[in-house]
Image: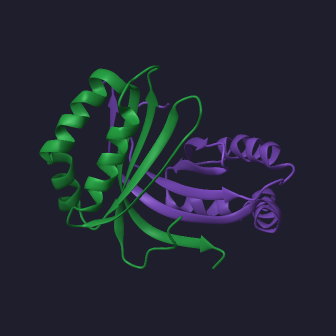
Chain colours: A green, B purple
Amino acid sequence: MDKTRTTSCYAVIFWSKLREGGEGYQEAAERMEALAAEQEGYVGIESVRDASGDGVTISYWESREAIARWRDHPEHRLIQERGRREWYAEYRLEVSRVERSLHFPA
Amino acid sequence: MDKTRTTSCYAVIFWSKLREGGEGYQEAAERMEALAAEQEGYVGIESVRDASGDGVTISYWESREAIARWRDHPEHRLIQERGRREWYAEYRLEVSRVERSLHFPA
């Protein structure tokens, strides 16, 4: 877990529910996390998924522009399309601006 | 999973890592979710935790004031203290303002 971030940033909250038996998901998710980390304006990414296939990934970005560039990255676009076709039963994405942050232990 | 919310709101992102063997955690978590839902300005709450004890809970609220009231709720305060003493190895909390939301399938 990252400690509290000192700079203001945006959090892209991505809740998702996987279909059963979708092949290639885990590999694609790892590739996207690595690719995101190479983008300008990237701050961090963290995710958790339970055994039933419900999960959330939150990526943190310096600006709305960085989020838009990542959304439109060609390789990411292809994976988004594949995700809707093959992997996700459902998802919800929220773009939010982080106003305060605290960490325990301090 | 809730569908896209039509009103603007705040998301309180609570990443946590549980210690091993903490008793009473699950019961307290369920009680807090139910109590949160009774509060004025509550919008929703969703959480996911994996088998290793890493999890995230995101609660959604109409206003900063509603978040502050929930933070200061006496029963919630006692559970926060117990959490630091007994259940959490680590946590990070972020208050963020949701600016955009989308859901799949639309």
Residue A4: x, y in percent?
50, 73
Residue A67 lies left or right of residue A88; in this view the side is left
User: Number of numbered discs present?
Assistant: 0
Q: Residue at x 66, y 42 (%)?
A: B51
Q: Quadrant of residue B48?
A: top right
Residue B101 lies left or right of residue B90; in this view the side is left
| On screen, residue A88 above or below A33 | above
Work out whether residue A104 or residue A29 is closer to the camera in this orientation and state it.
Answer: A29
Work out whether residue A92 or residue A76 is closer to the camera in this orientation and state it.
Answer: A76
Work out whether residue A55 or residue B40 is closer to the camera in this orientation and state it.
Answer: A55
Q: Quadrant of the C terminus of chain B?
A: top left
Residue B97: x, y in percent?
40, 57
Farthest residue to the right: give it: B23
Q: Residue at x 66, y 75 (%)?
A: A105
Q: Quadrant of residue B103?
A: top left
Residue B86: x, y in percent?
82, 63
Work out whether residue B65 or residue A89 is closer to the camera in this orientation and state it.
Answer: A89
Residue B20 lies left or right of residue A80; in this view the side is right
Residue B40: x, y in percent?
62, 48
Residue B6 in view, yes or no: no
Residue A36 in view, yes or no: yes
Q: Residue at x 30, y 47 (%)?
A: A31
